[in-house]
């Protein structure tokens, strides 16, 4: 895991109740730069999310990076959490990461609606599939 994600886990340990954690996730989303509208195209849109979600990946020196955006504040925050989990990580590690298990360390799995959980799974699947594709292409 990235040091940033480990820091996030520590932060969440200090936030006792779910509302504080929820607010922190939303604040993380607000802190992200908005995605340029030029990237909000069908190719970057993630299917399976109740809200509009776009993820734009890039691979540099065998490491995975992505930016994303959503029209829903909590989903923007979830994208920010995934950035902490996956950005700057080797492609193989992106593919091998049990993201559900890592996110469970934040307690997110217990507090998201079924729709949000499905959308989060769709985003993780897109990230890991993209990383795997880049590994196969190189």
Image (cartoon, rainbow, N blue to C red):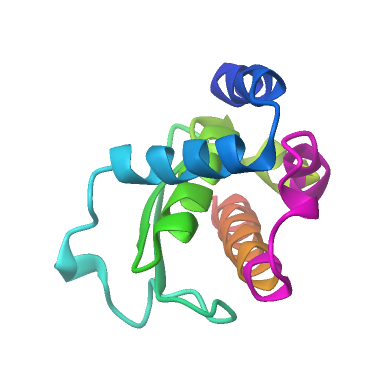
Q: Which of 7 and 93 lies nearest the eye of the viewer?
A: 7
Whether residue 94 sits left or right of residue 37 in the image: it is right
Q: Is residue 4 above or below residue 87?
A: above
Overall secondary structure of the magenta stretch?
helix
Q: Quadrant of the N terminus?
A: top right
Q: Residue at x 71, y 47 (%)?
A: 108
Whether residue 10 can be seen here: yes
Magenta residues, as a range? 99-117
Quarter residue 119 falls in: bottom right
Whether residue 77 sits left or right of residue 119 in the image: it is left
Whether residue 59 can be seen here: no
Q: Residue at x 70, y 27 (%)?
A: 16
Q: Which of 138 and 129 lies nearest the eye of the viewer?
A: 129
Q: Is residue 106 above or below residue 52?
A: above
Q: Position of residue 102 (x, y in %)?
A: 76, 38
Count of marks, rendered view: 0
Q: Is residue 68 above or below residue 44?
A: above
Quarter residue 5 falls in: top right
Whether 100 is among the magenta residues is yes
Q: Residue at x 49, y 36 (%)?
A: 24
Q: Residue at x 55, y 57 (%)?
A: 137
Q: Position of residue 44 (x, y in %)?
A: 38, 71
Q: Position of residue 10 (x, y in %)?
A: 67, 17
Q: Which of 25 and 3 lies nearest the eye of the viewer?
A: 25
Q: Position of residue 40 (x, y in %)?
A: 26, 72
Q: Is residue 2 above or below residue 55?
A: above
């Amino acid at each position: 895991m990235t040091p940033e994600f480990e820091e996030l886990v520590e932060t969440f340990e200090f936030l006792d109740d779910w509302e504080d954690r929820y607010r922190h996730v939303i604040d993380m989303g607000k802190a992200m730069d908005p995605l340029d509208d030029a990237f909000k195209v069908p190719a970057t849109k993630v299917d399976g999310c109740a809200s509009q979600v776009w993820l734009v990946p890039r691979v540099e020196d065998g490491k995975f990076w992505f930016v994303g955006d959503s029209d829903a504040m909590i989903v923007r925050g979830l994208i920010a959490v995934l950035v902490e989990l996956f950005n700057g990580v080797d492609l193989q590690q992106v593919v091998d990461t049990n993201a559900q298990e890592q996110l469970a360390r934040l307690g997110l799995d217990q507090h998201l609606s079924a729709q949000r959980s499905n959308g989060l799974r769709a985003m993780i699947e897109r990230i890991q599939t993209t990383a795997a594709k880049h590994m196969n292409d190189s």
